[in-house]
Amino acid sequence: MPKDDEIIQKELSRLNVHLPKSRKKLSQLLKEEEPKVQLKDGQFHYFKREELEYILSLIEEHEREFLYIPIILEITTTWHGYFRVRGKVAVKIIEKILGNYDMLEEKTEIILPRYLLPKIRKKLPTTTTYAFIVE
């Protein structure tokens, strides 16, 4: 009989089948004719070029080498009503979209209330995705 942890991990894998096998750098996606990543289920997810260019307008030129797309919005059981974004450049982009970016404060991780998700997803529908995690 499977243990509770095994059942939870199996369900999380099922919930996260929409995630990419691996993410690509923004610089790489901008060079592709049809920017896309392969998902865990074998299908492909395509990015809108206008969206990639919008992201590019929010960051410094050298940062395109450090940003992996899609940006992962982590939803976890640890923080009810909140989600997390990790990575210095990803955090910068999300904070600029939300209007609370402070150039003097370089964060590598932020935890935000879930009610902000629609605002982010409206601006970045193809370049962000949800990941469901247990910590």
Image (tube, rainbow, N blue to C red):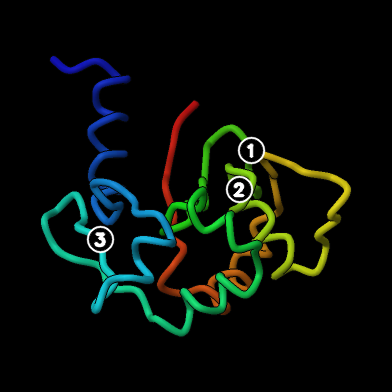
Q: Amino acid at mark 3?
A: Val
Q: Residue furthest front?
A: 62
Closer to the chain start, of discs 3 and 2, is 3
Q: Amino acid at mark 2?
A: Phe
Question: What residue is rendered at 64% in x and 57% in y?
Answer: 114
Image height check: is 91 above or below 33?
Answer: above
Which mark is in front, 1 or 2? 2
Which residue is denoted by mark 3 in the rendering? 37
Element class at badge 3: strand
| Location of residue 68 in the rendering, given as x and y in whole percent from the top left corner | 44, 52
Is the N terminus in the top left, top right, bottom left or bottom right quadrant?
top left
Which mark is in front, 1 or 3? 3
Count the marks.
3
Element class at badge 2: strand
Q: On the picture, is 14 further left or further right than 60?
A: left
Q: On the picture, is 120 further left or further right than 66?
A: right
Which mark is in front, 3 or 2? 3
Foreground residue among 12 and 68: 68
Foreground residue among 100 and 2: 100
Q: Residue furthest bottom?
A: 50
The mark found on residue 32 in the picture is: none
Closer to the chain start, of discs 1 and 3, is 3
The mark found on residue 79 in the picture is: 1
| Location of residue 73 in the rendering, given as x and y in whole percent from the top left corner | 52, 52
Question: What residue is rendered at 26% in x and 67% in y?
Answer: 36
Contact (Cβ within 8 Å) of mark 1 with mark 2: yes
Foreground residue among 124 and 36: 36
Q: CA distance from mark 3 to mark 2?
A: 23 Å
